[in-house]
Amino acid sequence: MRRVALLGAALAFPLAACGGEAETLDPETTEELAEIPESLAPFGDGYPASGDPCRQLGESEATSNYLDDSALLVGCPSEASAEALGGDIVGNVEGVRLVSVPMGDANVGMGENGPPPPAEGDALVDGTEYNATTILDCGFDGAEPTQRCDAGVVRNWMEDGSHLVEVQKPDGFKRALFFDGTTPVGADSAEADGSAGWDFDYTRDGDRVTIQYGPETYVIVDALITGG
């Protein structure tokens, strides 16, 4: 794993100033930054805002034990950036701090820690916290997606432009599916329903994606995400 060190190492490294004098970098500002590997399934271009050093993490073998249906999992390249998020640091993988950031229980709808209000012009469906609702094809216990499930989307629910789709399952619980643009990148998981560690995969056929999450299958059209 390559690591990128910030300028200003603990050595008092002299730099020539414009006037010919040397200045010393403060060693306390030095912190080694770990690269966030693809094994952590990072997505987006920064968390909580575009350009920030941390990134949201999706489902992978390396992250499955840390995922929780009531929190986002975020990877940060340094201790300082992790602590700035205000969540709980739950692990360290190759120097990347894994931070669990509460977002409200995805199985009971979006709570007070849920997504920010939608962008102006993208109104909510009356009586819901969704920008759009639909009925999509779904399947459970390894069956083909021949059932019908109610679903809603929260567009741009994170400042990096990612989207959230919540699907109402027949057992009364909800499954949260995360998208980077129209690309599925992960789903919520919990030990309670046995989903912790489930494999996440998808296939695309034109304007629709079929998401396979363990024994569950969901078919989602791009228009739900884009509003087209």
Image (cartoon, rainbow, N blue to C red):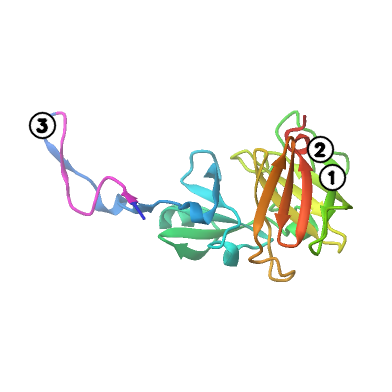
Q: At x 84% / y 48%, what residue is drawn?
A: 137
- Where does the magenta region start and end? 3-18
Q: At x 59% / y 64%, what residue is drawn?
A: 64
Q: Is residue 134 above or below residue 72?
A: above
Secondary structure of the residue carrying numbered label 3: loop
Magenta segment's dominant SS is loop
Residue closest to the eye, 162 or 99 = 162
Cα–Cα span, label 1 and label 2: 7 Å
Q: Amino acid at mark 2?
A: Leu
Q: Quadrant of the N terminus?
A: bottom left
Q: At x 68% / y 62%, what residue is drawn?
A: 189
Q: How many marks?
A: 3
Q: Quadrant of the C terminus?
A: top right
Cα–Cα span, label 3 and label 2: 61 Å
Q: Is residue 161 above or below residue 32?
A: above
Residue closest to the eye, 70 or 163 = 163
Q: Which residue is tagged 1? A: 128
Horizontal and vertical percent position of residue 46: 52, 43
